[in-house]
Amino acid sequence: MLHVKGRVLAGPDDVRDELWVVGGRISYDRPAGARDVRTVTGWALPGLVDAHCHVGLDAHGPVDAETAEKQALTDREAGTLLIRDAGSPSDTRWIDDRADLPKIIRAGRHIARTRRYIRNYAWEIEPDDVVAYVAQEARRGDGWVKLVGDWIDRDLGDLAPCWPREAVAAAIAEAHRLGARVTAHCFAESSLRDLVESGIDCIEHATGLSEDLIPLFAERGVAIVPTLVNIATFPRLAEGGERKFPRWSAHMRRLHERRYDTVRGAYDAGIPVYVGTDAGGSLAHGLVAEEVAELVAAGIPPLAALSATTWGARDWLGRPGLEEGAPADLVVYEADPRADVRVLAAPRRVVLNGRIIE
């Protein structure tokens, strides 16, 4: 039996003195005749959420189970206990049988236009097939489907939409019919209006979110996952592509330069913003604390940035936090993370399914 004592942050305004873990689940009532109790003290949060992560994927494509396990363990050590896997070609269902690994909500495999995405990542198809592939991935996933909304068009030498509007609208409608939400990778401005007006639920990266589009996102309640630790790589990417695609390189630099203004403008307008790292492509796992700090650097209040990886993120994904009877997935820190989100970088204890991870 586990006793967590100190300050339990069950919600932004719900702070309790203690909780108990009985049979792997949370209770706020002291169990009668409690024996063999282990006590942990500190500031407790729900297990952190990385809402854009790729377990089973690296820079070259799918990885073996041993590598995927290491990725998941790295996230766990950072306090990330719930992952929305935003596209992976690997079958990671075996992780669901491991009580010592983070819980994963899958979006299936990326769906991209032919030769318009990273090699070995996605189903690469043409618009006439997008509805069928969306239906396939909606059935394979855990309530999400991932489209690649834009990518570099080599003929134009710049970012451009991957899909005609009618194909996007039909694909999103099919996913919704099957009970799945849809998200899309989008760096640039030009694909966003068609996706949002077609009913998309979330946009990944959203660096192209401009002042004229912000009211549309807010009106439709479309969430964004900015992945600022990934956007930090844009200058290096731009430098690498400068000679061959100078227009694209200049565009990537502009998107990077305004990244903080974009995120703060979205937050100020009431657009839901959630934490995601984009780990598992070219980025390392375990970066959730850095992403929260980046949201604060962009001007999002610390409590809101904290909610974007805890209470708010779990509610958005339909998973419990520190409610009575919920699975005991929590992280304990030395100090109050509401006062300084940098505390998230050093978990004192990680508890997954009621067990302390040693």
Image (cartoon, rainbow, N blue to C red):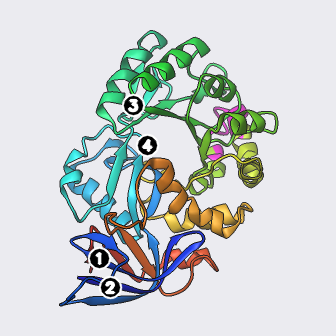
Give the amino acid type for the residue marked by disc 3 in the picture.
Ala
Q: CA distance from mark 1 to mark 2?
A: 6 Å
Q: CA distance from mark 2 to mark 4?
A: 35 Å
Q: Which one is earlier in the sequence, the residue at label 1 or at label 2?
A: 2
Position of the C terminus by quadrant: bottom left
Instruction: Pinpoint residue 285: horizontal percent, then vertical percent.
Output: 42, 60
User: Which mark lies nearer to you, 4 or 3?
Assistant: 4
Q: Which mark is residue 3?
A: 2
Q: Which one is earlier in the sequence, the residue at label 4 or at label 3?
A: 4
On the image, numbered disc 4 is attached to which residue?
A: 86
On the image, numbered disc 1 is attached to which residue?
A: 21
Question: Which one is in front, 151 or 169?
Answer: 169
User: Which mark lies nearer to you, 1 or 4?
Assistant: 1
User: Which mark lies nearer to you, 1 or 3?
Assistant: 1
Give the amino acid type for the residue marked by disc 2 in the picture.
His
Q: Residues within 10 Å of mark 1 (few under 14, many from 20)?
A: many
Q: Which one is earlier in the sequence, the residue at label 2 or at label 4?
A: 2
Residue stretch rendered in magenta on the structure: 238-249
Is there CB contact under 8 Å for labels 1 and 4?
Answer: no
Give the amino acid type for the residue marked by disc 4 in the picture.
Ala
Q: CA distance from mark 1 to mark 3?
A: 41 Å
Give SS at disc 2: strand
Q: Residues within 10 Å of mark 4 (few under 14, many from 20)?
A: many
On the image, numbered disc 3 is attached to which residue?
A: 122
Q: What residue is at 66 percent from the left and 36 percent from the top?
A: 243
Q: Which mark is residue 163?
A: none
Q: Quadrant of residue 347?
A: bottom left
Instruction: Pinpoint residue 67: horizontal percent, then vertical percent.
Output: 26, 55
Q: What residue is at 50 percent from the left and 26 percent from the top?
A: 116
Q: Which one is earlier in the sequence, the residue at label 1 or at label 3?
A: 1
Instruction: Pinpoint residue 76: horizontal percent, then vertical percent.
Output: 35, 66
